[in-house]
Image (cartoon, rainbow, N blue to C red):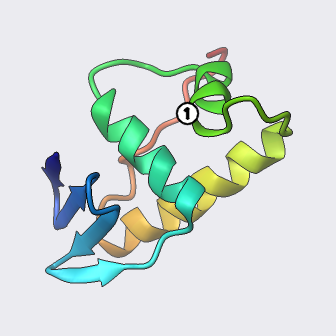
């Protein structure tokens, strides 16, 4: 499935993200995080859900999620989408 948002195109089947038709290099878990967030963009997603979705059957710390979100925010910022990922206190 192809998703378009801002200057980005996300092709889940090919595991490719394009910005202005140029491929953006993403680590596999960062790609998975972006795909999950795009598929669920209509709702707030809790930290535990993200950890279970991106790192299934693996015990990781919150730091792993924070690092992946930070890397994803940097990529989105380059495309002018600074506020695309927001933290909601308490969720």
Judge whether 2 appears above or below 78 on screen: above
**Where is residue 53 shown, x and y percent of the image?**
57, 30
Q: Tag 1's secondary structure?
A: loop
Judge whether 10 appears above or below 53 on screen: below
Q: Does residue 83 appear to the left or right of 53 in the view shown?
A: left
Report the residue at 24% width, 57% height from top: 10
Q: Does residue 74 appear to the left or right of 9 in the view shown?
A: right
Q: Quadrant of the C terminus?
A: top right
**Where is residue 58 shown, x and y percent of the image?**
79, 35
Tell which residue pokes out farthest to the bottom in this image: 22
Report the residue at 71% width, 56% height from top: 67
Q: Does residue 60 appear to the left or right of 57 in the view shown?
A: right
Report the residue at 44% width, 78% height from top: 25
Quadrant of residue 6 within the rendered picture: bottom left
Quadrant of residue 90 within the rendered picture: top right
Check disc 1: other Cα within 10 Å, few if <14, some if 14-19, many if 20+.
few
Q: Quadrant of the N terminus?
A: top left
Residue designated by label 1: 87
**Where is residue 88 shown, x and y percent of the image?**
55, 24
Q: Does residue 57 appear to the left or right of 14 in the view shown?
A: right
Quadrant of residue 17 within the rendered picture: bottom left
Report the residue at 43% width, 69% height from top: 75
């Amino acid at each position: 499935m192809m998703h378009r948002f801002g200057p980005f195109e996300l092709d889940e089947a090919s595991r490719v993200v394009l910005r202005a038709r140029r491929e953006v290099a993403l680590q596999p878990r960062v790609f998975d995080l972006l795909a999950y967030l795009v598929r669920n963009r209509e709702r707030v997603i809790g930290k535990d859900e993200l950890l279970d979705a991106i790192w299934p059957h693996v015990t990781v710390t919150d730091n792993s999620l924070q690092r992946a979100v930070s890397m994803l925010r940097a990529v989105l910022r380059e495309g002018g989408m600074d506020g695309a990922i927001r933290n909601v206190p308490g969720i």
